[in-house]
Image (tube, grey):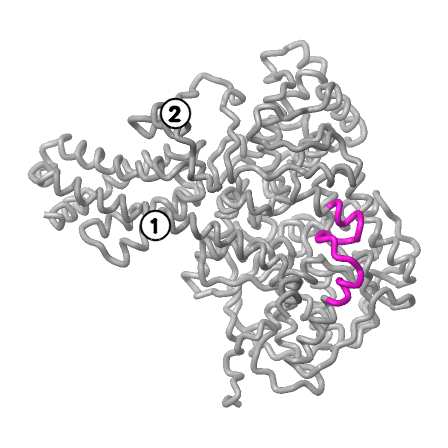
Amino acid sequence: MSKYVPKLSELKQEFEKKKPALLKEDYSGKEWWDLPVEFRDGNWCFPGKPEVLEDLGFSNPRKWAATDADWQLPGGWEKTIKDGLKSRLKRFRSFKLFLDTCVRCGACADKCHFFLGTGDPKNMPVLRAELIRSVYRNDFPLAEKILKGFSGSRKLTAEVIKEWHLYFNQCTECRRCSVFCPMGIDTAEITMMARELLNLIGVNNNWILAPVSNCNRTGNHLGIEPHTFVQNIESLVEDIEDLTGIKVNPTFNRKGAEVLFVTPSGDVFGDPGVYTMMGYLLLFHHIGLDYTISTYASEGGNFGMFTSNEMMKKLNAKMYHEAERLGVKWILGGECGHMWRVVHQYMNTMNGPADFLEEPVSPITGTRFSNAAATKMVHIAEFTADLIYHKKLKLDPKRNDHLVTTFHDSCNVARGMGMFEEPRYVLNNVCNSFHEMAENTIREQTFCCGSGSGLNAEEFMDLRMRGGFPRASAVRQVQEKHKVNTLVTICAIDRASLPTLMKYWNPGVSVYGLHELVGNALVMDGENKRTEDLRESPMSGFGEDEE
Amino acid sequence: MTIEWGRAVQENKKEILDAWMRRSLLLFSGKMAPGSPVADALHQALGMALDNFEKNSELLSEALVQLSRILAVQDMPPSRAMSLFFELKKIILELSLKSSQKQSLKQLDPDVLQNRLEELTLQAFDSFMIQREQICQLKLDESKRMLFMQLRRAEA
């Protein structure tokens, strides 16, 4: 039922409480934790289904909802949380450092897209971290234990758990705040720890845990089984042949291939990801790459990152196990966001070193990707940029003249691995019209789509639209100024969520993967005359009657 | 008469807009800062609505769409969102009583203002509900996109 069909009693209560003026209750003189925690339809994600938790062996499977008064927390949950916190403070020096060093300067406050979109003070990264820091102070640092009351500490209660659940699920772990923190605090890692602690007592999000469970079982988020995975790609192969007359020949689970290609499974089942997949397939055919696709490591994304370190490690490991089993030399990774943060920042200490693989060398250009010496995994944007730089691709950027583009830096690729130039270099070579958004909304300062880190749930739509507003606002500026109609991105969650965001805030702007534009621009040997792009939309100036 | 109210609103636009903006920000659940992207967009939409206050036009409809797009995804029911227009009435009437300089406002018929604001409120409510419908449609479209290949196969 819609959120705007309230019960009569609720309406009456609200009218009584809020009339006659708009002014709300006065919280001046009260502590921040006195601000009420209110779950309403649209601001919370459905919890993990009991069968999903049972599949994963996770704690406290049950049916519940965030709007319930009693969350059915397991007996002794306070001890579980405190022991969990203690253990993580010991295991993760960064976590302890981040809790101890914040000086509450507020530099991060207005950098969070959720704070900018909601105005809720608890969405200021400093205050969101304080939700957990206040409990930490109550029980851990000696001086603050003694100076209770002065140190901003509080006891762990069921209300605190509700508050954690509400606000640590209004952080997309995008790390924009950390760019501005003079102490280098990574609030995303605090969120990761908080969500890990909440999972210990069965407080969770089904949009995260269902993909984790599927990935754990079948190797990808949607739970597509190997034969269906192959059929989907073969179907795209047929589409490519219909459009271009070219028959591309991807191989699956082929031992001895030079390269294992791993991409988010959204590229194999979802719109518009499938068009990006078609772009990859055309590219690999164009350069004659010796590659294979695994139907077991059939997912680049890693929702384990939003669950626990152990789950992140396990899901990441499957790519490397497959690479070893198939005997490839190195891994080529598709357009994904958090896959790259996991690979770039955590993989080497979790599952590395991947000594059974070789330092990646492009078989086409001979370029050695020494930046991937540890992970043995190369990002498709840098691989393609290298091909273009060495003039190995025959491109006709005019084929994208129907698209006036701008580029959305995906948080995890931009801030997680510092990749800014390569996608822009590719984009500028495959289309003729590219316009940057405002400086403080791109590159390392990029704004999140508002749906990352497993918050892309439909029941969370209202908050996603609010959290994504700063990004949409920046797109709107270039839409009005340059008539931009295309938002290009290199992340599967962006490709899934930004079309919705654009349709709501900026109608007329469509979302594309970078390699979809590459696929449009590639001039293939022996191809039919192209009049349509990979979406079967007419290309400007390439109609049947136009030469 | 509505045209005269429209002219009077234009003459006092800055004061009315500032006051309306201040009160609008109070609608939000937390502390929406005046310089934030949401507040900027809200300011633009409110200003546009005041500019086109006197009669219905495409620009007025666009202003109401922009306004309702922001309001429709906030943590508030439609009644609370629409109370924004009741505040506008108060602001204009308060202004008309405040000083002798506002003679132009004093001389105008408040019933005409009341009628115009009621009309605007109802239009804004329609627009608000269209945005809510849009949210439902977006949820459906997103689910379909996620299952694109499965649906395609099922339809084949």
Main secondary structure found in the magenta portion: helix
Q: CA distance from mark 1 to mark 2?
A: 26 Å
Residue A122 visible at all: yes
x and y percentages locating residue A388 in the rendered image: 69, 73
A407 relative to A111, above or below: below
Name above or below for residue A129 compared with residue A437. Answer: above
Is A247 a magenta residue? no
Q: Which residue is mark 2?
A: A13
**Position of residue A498 in the picture relative to residue A343 (left or right):** left
Q: Position of residue A236 (x, y in %)?
A: 69, 71
Protein chain holding label 2: A
Q: Dot 1 falls on which chain?
A: B
What is the magenta range?
A: A212-231
Check disc 2 and report its element: helix, strand or loop: helix
Residue identifier under label 1: B127
Residue type at tag 2: Gln
One can see residue A425 in this view: no
Q: Which label sits on residue A489?
A: none
Total marks placed: 2
Residue A345: x percent and y percent?
76, 46
